[in-house]
Amino acid sequence: MGAALVVFMVLAVAAFRLQVIKYSKYRSLARDNYVVYVPIKAPRGDIVDRNGRVIAGCRQSFSICAVPRSILRNEREIAILSRILELEEDDIREILQPTASSYRPTAIVRDADFAALSAVQESFAELPDVMVIAEPVRSYPGGEYFGHMIGYVGEATREEIKRSPAAYASGDFLGKAGIEKQYEAYLKGKAGRRYVKFTPGGGSGPVEVDDPPRKSPTPAWRLHLHADAALQELAHRLLKGRRGCILAIDIHTGGILVMASSPTFDPDLFAVGISPDDWKSIIGSEAKPLINRAIQSAYPPGSTFKIATAGMALEEGVITPRIRLEPCRGAYRFGNRTFRCWKEAGHGAVGLVEAIKVSCDVYFYQLGERLSPDIFGSYGAGWKLDKRTGVDLPGEITGLVPDGAYYDSAYGKGKWTRGIMLNLAIGQGEILVTPLELLCFFCGVANDGKYYVPRCVDRAETDGAVQRFRGDPVVLDISQATLEILKNSMLGVVEGDNGTGHAARLPGIRVAGKTGTTQNPHGDDHASFVCFAPFDNPEVAVYVLVENAGHGSTEAAPAARRLLMEYFGIAEPEEVVGG
């Protein structure tokens, strides 16, 4: 009994000491010690080219973070952190204010350098609400060559967090453009978690606790592109210093082998949050480097569209390959207006195949006379030349193939003349198409009237699971007889004598193509060239557009040739066009 009484008295004294004498001290410690949830961010999924070369990956980074709810009440701690990081105190408060009530660490400095990290580590005793967090940061080994196709990431906005609160929190990054945005659900992975205890005056900074236990992040998917990095890099070198785009598509699958738009940008600038100066430089540039000219710019197609015009005329029965129209003498008179051919001396009397081979404007003016805006618009719509292709990229725009209703709306019913058809027939006037829309049509011509919805991503893989992405087939309403005439005419453009596309010839492989020179009211003509090869069993289709460059035959066709040589593994020393 006496022993029990002694034990009771000892416990009572101890309790009195803890609860009364030391109450203030332990109350303060209990209040200031806290455990917070710290997410373990999952690395974004790798994006690799068709050969496994990493185009977008992740690297390890260290961010200097603080617990907003605690540090915002500690002016002294903010002052110390301000001095160490050489940041204004108000700037630190501004960064933390959006999450002021949160115990979740918020990054003050992302991707901190060694000097800043060392200074914080040495001052942990004075920074009880600060910690350094290791986290993966997006990196782009593919660099600016893949800027438009891959896109970039950026910090989640309040609106994006509000839309998906379970997926994103302040400080998280997500895809903002390109494949990064389109395939965000595959690339983001799922964050894990750990719990960290903050102890004022601990001297060594926050300490991870085992209860609750750590949970590892769920890996993201790995995306495999159709693109070939070597071809993509070559395309950008061919466009160096110029504005334009180059596309290459696998005719059998719709897989995009090349999508180069120039000027481009470096997606690494966005990886940890772009600086105000870099952002101003990009959006203030007259060249608009963020615009993907392959899918976000529409151009008059110029003479490349003569293939479509010829197809319309053949399908409507207003022409046959053997019929010769009025000879070309360098110009054509329609009403009180003269429409000129690109060749001042003229081409003489030519049939359809020869007219395509030498790109005779006068011949096509006469085809335009025999067509109507409604016929023109109907075929354009049926051949998907005025519709988005459905490529797996955000931001695609659509072109315009005008019809009678369009002109009635623009000029008033019946207040336009049939002279508009002469311009439309040679791909000028109000007609606009994106490079990808136009190339898809030519894939259909090459592939007996069928092409596939173009796709950048071939498949996604994770933990042994594979998901493949296939573009649906699109069938053009065009007869085989017409297709054969168009294909053989395009063969003559490259392989025939006096063909305007002879600069695209390859040793041992027959190429079919069509040159284009598009009048530009804002400057020099645009040069373009579209082709497919091999002619007998087409594998690849290529489109080259160079703004303000002049003639497609001299500026675009040689670039297409270089790309085809790389694709087919044909070696030949040659200077890079535009390099």
Image (cartoon, helix red, strand yellow):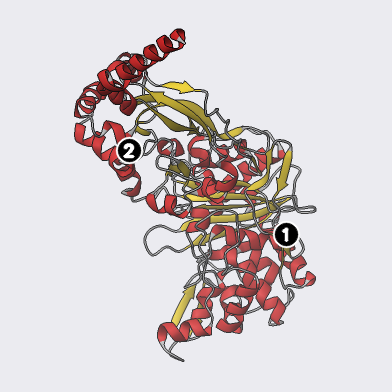
The mark that comes first in sequence, 1 or 2, is: 2
Determine the secondary structure under disc 1.
Answer: helix
Q: Residues within 10 Å of mark 2 (few under 14, many from 20)?
A: few
The residue located at (53%, 41%) in the rendering is 146
Q: Position of residue 287 (x, y in %)?
A: 37, 50
The residue located at (72%, 52%) in the rendering is 253
Q: Quadrant of residue 269?
A: top left
Residue 372 appears in the figure: no
Q: Is residue 235 above or below residue 60?
A: below
Left or right relative to 172: residue 500: right
Inspect the image, locate mark 2, and give the three-letter code of the amino acid beneath it.
Answer: Ser
Q: Position of residue 359 (x, y in %)?
A: 60, 64
Determine the secondary structure under disc 2.
Answer: loop
Q: Position of residue 366 (x, y in %)?
A: 59, 79
Residue nearest the observer in this picture, 125 or 223: 125
Inspect the image, locate mark 1, and give the three-letter code of the amino acid beneath it.
Answer: Ala
Residue with the mark numbered 1: 446
The residue located at (55%, 49%) in the rendering is 246
Q: Is residue 424 above or below residue 212?
A: below
> Which mark is nearer the camera, 1 or 2?
2
